[in-house]
Every structure is written in C-alpha cells, then in structure tokens.
Image: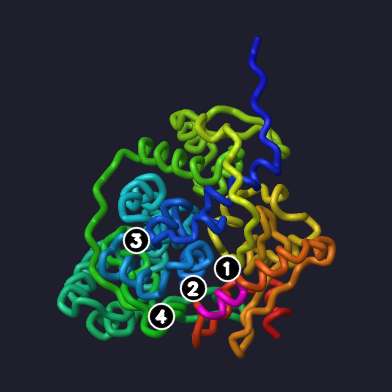
C-alpha cells in the first residue's frame, strides 16, 4: 500500500518565507552574500533590484558593502544563467549555475548572433573568433572599458545589423552589445562597476576568470537541491519555469535531489525531507520588495501568496512583477518611488483591515527604504499598472 503524500498548506508555505527568505525581523542583520545564499540567486535584469532585494532583508547592508562584494571581493558574481535571465549569485555557486544552466544559454546566444552576422554581413566563424580575440586583448590592455570604448579599439564591433526589417520600429544597431553579451554569457568577460549610481544600467566590462567545468547533470541536481531548500515545496512546473530547463532535465534533477513528493493546493509537489517539519514562528513581518525580486519570481504558481484578483495590478503583460508590499507571507499591496523620493504604498481594499501593527510596520519599512535610496531615483524596467499610478 502506497503511503499518503504529506500535505503542505498555503498557510504553512507562507510561514516558511519569513525564515527561508530572511524577511522576518530577527534575520535582518545578514550580509549581502548571506541574502544571496538564502535566495539561491538575486535577480539582476534591473540593476537596482540587487541592491533593493538585499536592503529589504538586511538593515545592516549598505551600498558600499554590496559594491565591495560585487566588484572587489567578488563574493557575488553577476551572470546570465537560469531562464536566460541575469542573476547575481554567491561565488561558490557560480560554477554550478554555469554548468547547469549558463552553458546552454551561451551556446544559443553565440549561435543566434553568428547566424545574423553571417546572413546580413557575410562574415563567418573565422571573423567571429578573430574579433573575439581582439576584444579580449583590448579589454586586457585597458583593465576595464565601456562598450563604446571597446568599439573604438575594435572597429569590427561597429558593424550594424537590421532588426525588425520592414516594421515601423525597424532598427539598425551596432553589434557591440550583443557581441559583448555572448562573451559574457560564456564567462570570458564580466560586468564591472556602473558608470553612474548603483541603480545605473550602464557599466564597464572586465576580463573574467573562466568557471571550473562541472558535469552538467550533477550541476543541475545541485542547483535544484539549492532551489528546493530555499523555495520548496514546489511543483515540477515551478522548477522547470525557474530554471528554464526541459521537462526531461527537470525530472532527472528532481530525482537526484532526494526530494519527496508532497501535496500542495495546486497539485503534487516536491520538498526536501528536512523541510517537512513546521517552520519556527518568526512573528509577523512587513517587507517592501522591488520589482523582479527573487521571492515573488521564485514560483510559476503564485496563488498561495497572491490573490488572483490583484495579479493584473502587479504584473506586466509578460509576467514580470513590479514592486510588491508583503505582510507575513502574502502580498497585500504595492509601492513606488516618486520623483521627490517619497515611497508611496497602497494596500488592496480587500485587505485594508490589517490592523495597527501591520500599518506601523509597513510605514517603518517605507521610511527605511527611503533612507536607503537617499538621492537616487529609479524607474523599474518592467512597469506595472499599480506602480505607474503610485509614482505619478
């Protein structure tokens, strides 16, 4: 007779977030590297997200501390990996993400650009390899350089291609950004310090040390184990979505992780055996998480922490979440930064009776976030209806 699968309710999953994702007040003295380890990786498509995700979880973290971890100690590594998304990971996990996800992404990136260059410019693999060596030599000579500086040193990067030919939005960009993006995906170069503030999307490039090579299957198993430790329980679809793997690779990695099957509200799921026990009570907590924060972007199924009635307010048309307001494991509203630096918050009407403690905690978090921003102003890369209204 087959034993019944353990049932994990939505309330139990929400209770885990405070401790697993370092959001409860007792955990808010974590260093940037500790925050990244707790979440496996920090979303970095929007540069500000990295800083704001850490700031939301650690009152002790500062911009200077994060910059030191990213650009001096290299305790954190920025790379294109899972789901062809930019992440910041702990340095010790970078080789695992490289073997388990980034290599396949890099192959596709190089193949796609090489095809465009050959079809539109008539230049083949020999040209691509020679240009690559020129770029690496120029970058080594400079130490660090912007894309524009590298295009000055390597004229081949100034070649133009046509995008969306014949469309009203047809463009003819240089290949510079895409070419450098391929080298970055392959781990040959990496992003250095931004040109402006910590929220700037313009940055310098530096030569990178290649990651140690690991067997891909073993790397995927370790990666999914790390994911389940932070985000479990999760469904097979959650894992496949977060990693960007095929269903076959997802199932193989799950089988090797030692995870057990559990029942979730949305169907069968997976959890590590050590995660079945009830989590410790960390008390109520409030958090203002940035757009694309790792917590709300950690699952394909989100109904257990977000009322479906509010999904259209917080997500854009492609499924990217904007700034969200949390109270003890569920999303209760959103926030935005206004032009004068004020942090405007909004609690959904159907949860407006949170109580005085919640209201005070949310206000305190908004004040703390405003202090972290200082004079820096941001606009999320992916704008959502609620964020647009609040920032107006």
Write down the region rendered in magenta.
365-371
Give the residue at mark 2.
48
Give the residue at mark 1.
290
Secondary structure category for the residue under label 2: helix
Task: Residue 385 in the image: state x and y as whole percent.
Answer: 72, 73
Q: Is residue 130 left or right of residue 312?
A: left
The answer to whether residue 387 is above or below residue 3 is: below
Mark 1 or mark 3: whose residue is earlier in sequence: 3
Q: Quadrant of residue 72?
A: bottom left
Q: Main secondary structure of the magenta part?
A: helix
Callout in the foreground (1, 4): 1
- Residue 368 belongs to the span the image colors magenta: yes
Q: CA distance from mark 2 to mark 3?
A: 15 Å
Mark 3 or mark 4: whose residue is earlier in sequence: 3
The one of 158 and 228 positioned closer to us in this rendering: 228
Q: CA distance from mark 2 to mark 4?
A: 12 Å
């Amino acid at each position: 007779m087959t034993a019944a699968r353990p049932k994990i309710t939505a309330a139990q999953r929400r209770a885990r977030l405070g401790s697993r994702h370092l959001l409860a007040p007792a955990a808010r003295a974590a260093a940037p590297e500790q925050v990244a380890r707790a979440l496996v990786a920090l979303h970095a498509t929007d540069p500000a997200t990295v800083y704001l995700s850490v700031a939301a979880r650690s009152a002790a973290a500062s911009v200077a501390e994060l910059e030191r971890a990213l650009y001096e100690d290299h305790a954190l590594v920025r790379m294109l990996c899972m789901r062809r998304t930019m992440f910041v990971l702990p340095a010790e996990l970078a080789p695992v993400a490289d073997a388990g996800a980034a290599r396949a992404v890099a192959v596709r990136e190089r193949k796609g650009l090489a095809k465009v260059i050959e079809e539109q410019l008539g230049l083949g693999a020999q040209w691509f390899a020679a240009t690559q060596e020129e770029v690496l030599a120029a970058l080594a000579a400079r130490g660090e350089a912007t894309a524009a500086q590298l295009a000055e040193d390597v004229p081949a990067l100034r070649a133009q291609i046509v995008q969306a030919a014949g469309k009203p939005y047809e463009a003819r960009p240089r290949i510079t950004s895409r070419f450098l993006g391929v080298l970055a995906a392959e781990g040959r170069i990496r992003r250095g310090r931004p040109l402006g503030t910590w929220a700037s999307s313009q940055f310098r490039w530096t030569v990178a040390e290649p990651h140690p090579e690991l067997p891909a299957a073993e790397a995927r198993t370790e990666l999914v184990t790390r994911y389940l430790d932070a985000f479990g329980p999760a469904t097979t679809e959650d894992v496949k979505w977060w990693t960007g793997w095929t269903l076959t690779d997802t199932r193989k990695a799950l089988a090797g992780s030692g995870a057990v099957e559990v029942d979730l509200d949305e169907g069968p799921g997976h959890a590590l055996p050590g995660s079945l026990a009830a989590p410790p009570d960390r008390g109520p907590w409030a958090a203002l998480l940035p757009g694309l924060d790792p917590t709300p972007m950690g699952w394909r199924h989100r109904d257990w922490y977000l009322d479906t009635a509010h999904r259209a307010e917080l997500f854009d048309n492609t499924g990217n979440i904007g700034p969200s307001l949390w109270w003890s494991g569920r999303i209760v509203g959103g926030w935005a930064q206004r032009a004068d630096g004020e942090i405007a918050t909004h609690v959904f009407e159907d949860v407006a009776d949170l109580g005085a403690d919640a209201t005070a905690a949310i206000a305190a978090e908004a004040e703390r976030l405003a202090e972290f921003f200082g004079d820096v102003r941001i606009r999320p890369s992916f704008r959502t209806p609620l964020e647009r209204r609040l920032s107006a």
